[in-house]
Image: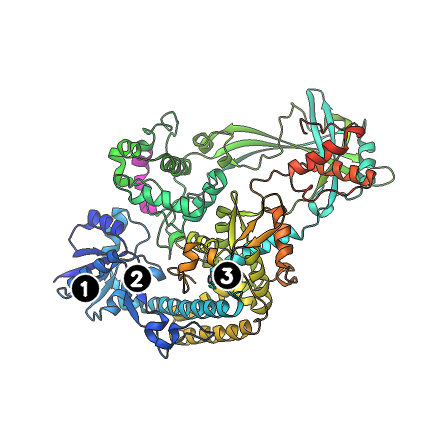
Amino acid sequence: MKTLIIVEKPSQARDLRAAIGSRFGEILPAEGHLIRLAEPDEVNAGWKRWSCELLKPDGLYPTRAAREMTKSAKLKAIAAALKDCDGVILATDCDREGQLIGQEILEHLRYRGPVRRALFTAQDPKTLRQAFERLKPNAEMQPLYQAAVARQQADQIFNLSLTRTATKTLLAPQARGVIGIGRVKTPTLAIVCMRELEILNFKPEDYFEVEATATVAAGSFLMRHAPTEAKRIKDRARAEAIAKAAAGFEGPITLKVEDKRRAPPKLFDLPALQKHCSQRWGWTADRTLSVAQELYDGDGKKLITYPRAEARYLSENQIADVPAIVTALLKVRGFAGLEIGEPVIRRGKSGTFSDKALEGVAHHAIIPNVNVLDDMDARVARLSEDEKKLFAVICRSYLAAVMPDYEYRHTVVTLDVPMPGNGQVSFRATGHVPLRLGWKAVFGANSAETEDGAEGAETLPQMQNGENATLTEPQVKACTTEPPPRYNEGTLIDAMQNAWKFVDDPALRERLKEAKGIGTPATRAEIIKGLKAQNLLAASGKLVVPTPSGLKLYELLAKAAPSLVDPGTTAQWEMRLDEVVLGQNDFRTVINGIAKSAAELISNLQQQANVKVDLAPAVRHAGSGRSRRLPPEAASPARKRRRGPVRPRGSQGPQTEAAVSPPLEQAELEERQSHLQQENVRKPTPRMIAFARAIAKKKSVDLPRGCELNFDTCRAFLQQHASDNGSRFGKRGP
C-alpha cells in the first residue's frame, strides 16, 4: 500500500523524515496555502469594475492554484503522487488554518481516497513518532475544516466588498490608492487612532507628593508620602500641611521583611519576541520576523525552531532535550562562564513544559534547535550581527527557563505621622536585597529583562521593628500626570494579541482571549506594513502613529460603521465558527450571516459620500508648520500601480469618547500632529513643567506650543524667562 504524507512546509518535511523516515510513506511539503480563492472577476466578469456591491457568489468562491512558481511546482508534485497512491496522511499544523492548508489541496484535486490525520504540537522526533502511532480518520476533522472554509470565504466577501465600497465612496476625487478595509486591519488602525486621540485630548493634572529624610540609629534614608492614583493630593496647601507635620516628627517605624522568589520569564512566542526587539533595538515587527526566519531556515543556519510560534510553552516530551541543549549553549561564547547547575524543570501552565497549555496550538515556543547542537559554533559563525543578537536573546530565554528562581528580600518601612486636628498620613520606603540571582545571572542583574518589581526600592540601613525614626528636610514634590505612551510595533502587536481589552461585552472578551486577539503571529507584521503602505499609519522614530488620513478614516468609520473598527467583530465571528466546529451550525449559514452584515455596512458607508479621505502623504514645507498634499501623479510607484485590494493570507470598535468625538479637520490634525509626532522626542521632567507653568502665570505669558511635551522647547522657555527668578534651569539643564 502506497501512502502520501502531506506536510505544511519544507522544514516540517525535514523534521518528519528525520523522525520516521519513509516507514509511513512518501513525504511531500506544501508551502503554506497552495490553493487560493478565485478573484471576484474570475467568478463574475461584471465584478472586474469596482463598485459598491456585495461580492458574494451564489455558492462558494471556487478554488484556484496559487500563482507563485514555487507553490505551483509543489502542487504539481502532490498531484502526481496522488495518482499513484492508495491513501493520504495529512500532517499539516493541527490548528484550523493547518487543516485548511492540507485538506483544500485534496478537495481542489478531487482526491476521494482514504485520508488519515496526524496531530502534533511539537516537531521533536518523539512527538512526531507518537503522532504517527495514533493516526485518526480525517473525517473527524471535517467540522474544523468547514469552519476554516467559512472563515476564508467570509473574509473574502467581507474584506473585498467593503474595501471596494470604501474606496469608491470615501476616497477623495483624483486621489490614488485604496482604502483597505479588513476584519483585522481596520480594528488595528482603530487601536492606534484611539491611543492618538487619547493623547491629543489629554489634559495634564498637577498633584503633589511629600518626601522627607528619615534617620534611625544605623543611618538615613528617604521616605515618601505618595498616595495611590485615586487618592492623589491635588491641593498644594494640603501637601504643605503634611510637610509641616512631618518636619522634626519622631515616632516608631513599622518594618515588614519578606523573602520572596520569582520564576523566570516565559519563553518567547513570536509576538513576545517582536515586542522585545522593538523595545530594545527599535526593530519593526517585520524585521524581527525576517531575522528569525533566517535563523530558522537560512542556508547553513537552522539554529532555532519555527519562529511563527503562538505559544510560550514546550511539550513535556521536550524535557528530555534539556541537558543536551544546556550543555551545547554553555559552550557558546558569551554563556561559557554561567553556573547553571542542575536544570530546573517547571511543569504546568505556571511553568515551561505543559502539554495542556499546548492543546489546540500548532507551534510551541521559540527555542534553540536540538537537531544542530553538534556543530552549533560553526553555524553561529555564519550569522550576521542582527542574527547573532536575536539568537543570543533566544538562547538566554531558554537557559533562564531551566535555571533556579531569583530570590530576594523585600523590605517595607512605614511611619505614621499625625496631622493637626485629626487623622494621620503614612510615609513609606521600600528596600530590595538580592539573595540568589538564579535565572537573572544569564541576563545580568541590571538588565531590562530582569524586571522584578524593585523599581523605587533603595538601600536601607539596618533597623528594628518599632525603632524610632526622625523625619527631617520634608519637601513637597510637584508632579504632573502624563498621557499614555504611543505604540511601537512591538507594543502594537501586543495590543492586537490582547485586543479583548478594548471590548466591553464579557462573552466577547473571553472569546477574544481564547482566539489570542486579532490576526495571527504570521499575519500581524504584514497588517501593520500594509497600513503604512496605504498611508494610514506612519513611523515616527521607533513609534507607530496614525497619519491625518488614518485618523480621519477612523473617526468616519467609528461613527458610520462602528463594527468595522471593533475588535469584538472577530470574537463574534469566532463564536459562530465555534458553532460549526461543534456541529451546532452549518458553515454556509455562517457565511451568509456575515455576508448580510457586510451588505448592511456597505449601505452605511454609501451614506457617507459627502466625506472624503485623501491618502496622499503630506509634504511639510521647510521652515513652516504648514503642509500640502502630493498631487495624484506624485504618489509612490507602488501606490500608482495598485488597482485593486490587497488581501493578506488568512486575514480576518471599541466604543470610547475618542471613538465618537467629532471629526477633526485635516489641517487641524496636521497642525496638532506636527508638534506631537516628532521623532525621538524627549519629554521635560515634571519639575520643569511645574516651574514653566509657575513662570508663565507670574509673568502673564503663554507657554509655547509643545512646552509640556518637548524637553528642548521647555528648556528654551525656562532659559528665556527664568534668569530673574534664580532658577537652576540654566544652560546645563536640570
- As drawn, the residue found furthest toward the right would be 421
Residue type (three-letter) at the residue carrying disc 1: Ala
Q: Quick check: 499 left or right of 726?
A: left
Distance between mark 2 and mark 1 Cα atoms:
15 Å
Q: Looking at the image, is 620 positioned above or below residue 722?
A: below
* Relative image position of residue 50 (x, y in whole percent): 43, 71
What secondary structure is marked by label 2?
helix
Look at 80% across and 30% down and name the residue there: 725
Residues under numbered marks 2 and 1 in contact, where contact means CB atoms less than 8 Å apart = no
Residue neighbourhood size for the residue with mark 1, other residues' Cα within 10 Å, grouped as few (<14), some (14–19), many (≥20): some
Tell me which segment is drawn in magenta.
Answer: 316-326
- As drawn, the residue found furthest toward the top would be 218
* Relative image position of residue 560 (x, y in whole percent): 58, 69
What secondary structure is marked by label 3?
helix
* Relative image position of residue 552 (x, y in whole percent): 58, 60
Q: Quadrant of residue 555?
A: bottom right
Q: Looking at the image, is 160 positioned above or below residue 676?
A: below
The mark lying in front, picked from 1 and 3, is 3
Distance between mark 3 and mark 2 Cα atoms:
25 Å
What secondary structure is marked by label 1?
helix
Quadrant for the N terminus, please.
bottom left
Q: Evaluate whether residue 312 shows in this view.
A: no
**Majority secondary structure of magenta residues:** helix
Quickly name the residue at label 2. 101
The answer to whether residue 321 is magenta is: yes
Distance between mark 1 and mark 3 Cα atoms:
38 Å
* Lower position in the chain sequence, tag 3 or tag 2: 2
Residue type (three-letter) at the residue carrying disc 2: Ile
Quickly name the residue at label 1. 79
* Lower position in the chain sequence, tag 1 or tag 3: 1
* Lower position in the chain sequence, tag 2 or tag 1: 1
